[in-house]
Image (tube, rainbow, N blue to C red):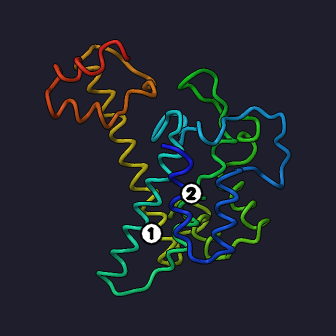
Amino acid sequence: MKDDNLLAIAGGIKDAELREKVVAMLRDPRLSMIETEGSQYTAFAKSPASKRRHHSYENGLVVHTYSTAKIALCLSDIIEEVYGVKVDRDTVIAAALLHDLFKHVTYNEVYPGKYTTSRLGERLDHMSLIIGELYARRFPLDVIHAVAAHHGDNGPIAPQTLEALAVHLADSTDATMSDKVLFAAKDILRDCMGVEVQTLPLEVSPFKVVAAKKEGGCGEVKRRFSGMV
């Protein structure tokens, strides 16, 4: 998954000023308020979305962001088609693409597949960083709210708009799905191949492990992944 996938979705933002702001942040996810030059942290394109749970692998942050945006747009379709209420898709797209943007500066890769918290991440969480940056860059209040509310009741504020709710539910859905599939894949590899895996290699997709088990049992799992884990 490449950054271009995110830029393609950002291209769907109709408001030109908002679209330019989102694209600028995706192309160069740099904090303007805090000096990070020389700091050790993971590059955005290579960053996981979490250290040990959902999307905890190289490029996981981009994958999670892309999936969250796609789910949020599907939820927007449902809200409009089923419930007859108009959704501001510009806000949904912008918030979905930016909600986890600065997670990468809170992580530091120790070795492939193993991440620790960066010095900056020890002092400020990704939510504080992105909200502060959105304020500094004068993003619309509804976009800032949707980003601030993406953790739902567990965040600084619960969703107060349909757009914020769609982003929260999309984020939660994708994170939960990835989390469950990751742990299922680890169980399958242990049961079928007798290996305890803490982190999966980049080339071993947990979704493909689960699919292999369904298609051909442990034999298919061994055929596809022997020598890879």
The x and y percentages for residue 54 are 45, 41
Q: Secondary structure at mark 1?
A: helix
Residue at 47% over, 46% down: 63
Label 1, on which residue?
A: 166
The x and y percentages for residue 167 are 48, 65
Q: In the visual, does 219 lie left or right of 185? A: left
To which quarter of the image does residue 18 belong?
bottom right
Around disc 2, counting alpha carbons within 10 Å, would you say few (fewer than 14), some (14 to 19), or many (20 or more)?
A: some
The x and y percentages for residue 44 are 63, 42
> Would you place residue 17 above or below residue 124 in this image?
below
To which quarter of the image does residue 140 belong?
bottom right
The CA distance from mark 1 to mark 2 is 20 Å
The x and y percentages for residue 40 are 75, 32
Q: In the visual, does 61 lie left or right of 83? A: right
Label 2, on which residue?
A: 7
Q: Secondary structure at mark 2?
A: helix
> Would you place residue 74 above or below residue 124 in this image?
below
> Would you place residue 106 above or below residue 132 in this image?
above
Residue at 43% over, 53% down: 67
**Which three-letter amino acid code belongs to the residue tagged 1?**
Ala
Is mark 1 in CB contact (under 8 Å) with mark 2?
A: no
Seen as rendered, the residue at the extreme left is 216
Which quarter of the rendering shows the C terminus?
Answer: top left
